[in-house]
Amino acid sequence: MDKAKKINIPKPDSIKKPEPTEEVKSQLPVPKGWKILIAMPEANEATDGGIIKASQTKIDEETSNICGFVLKLGTEAYCDENRFPTGPWCKEGDWVIFRAYSGTRMKMYGKEFRLINDDTVEAVVDDPTGVVRA
């Protein structure tokens, strides 16, 4: 009789919502038009097995990340009823999935942010823990 493999599913709290400090918040760019400001989660320093990752590995993971936290929507995001007849695809506070390397990347105080187009959002997820680029 075959034993079922136990799948190690990370706990939802293993990825914390990016919460910029007040100093960072006051200096974040305000998305204009149809842009969305996304806070990117930080890459882990080590693997699940405890091996410390190389700096380049962390940079590659951050650059190709496909999941982020919606901080702010531009004033025209999701306003075009012809393009978005069912309404907005996401809102502030959502975790969203988008294509790798999407948007304008920037770092402020060691934290990465992106400005993406409203139509770049491909999905909303409740728990980003297991979302990784294939």
Image (cartoon, rainbow, N blue to C red):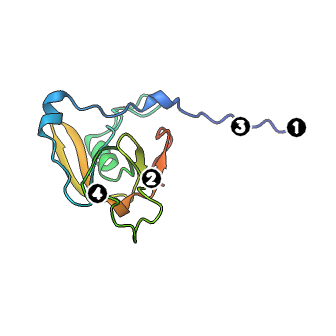
Give the percent coordinates (x, y) of residue 95.
41, 44
Q: Distance between the residues labelled 1 and 4?
A: 50 Å
Which tag is nearer the camera, tag 1 or tag 4? 4
Q: How far apart are marks 4 and 2 (CA)?
A: 18 Å
Callout 1 crowding tier (Cα within 10 Å): few <14, some 14–19, many ≥20: few
Quadrant (top left, top right, bottom left, bottom right) of the N terminus: top right
Label 3, secondary structure: give it.
loop
Callout 4 crowding tier (Cα within 10 Å): few <14, some 14–19, many ≥20: many
Q: Distance between the residues labelled 1 and 2?
A: 34 Å
Task: Quickly name the residue at label 4.
Answer: 116
Marks 1 & 2, CB-CB < 8 Å contact:
no
Q: Which mark is residue 133?
A: 2
Q: Earlier in the sequence, mark 3 or mark 2?
A: 3
Q: Which mark is residue 5?
A: 3
Which residue is at the far right? 1
Would residue 44 appear left or right of 125 to someone viewing this image? left
Q: Distance between the residues labelled 3 and 2?
A: 23 Å
In front of the other: 8 or 118: 118
Label 4, secondary structure: give it.
strand
Q: How far apart are marks 4 and 3 (CA)?
A: 39 Å
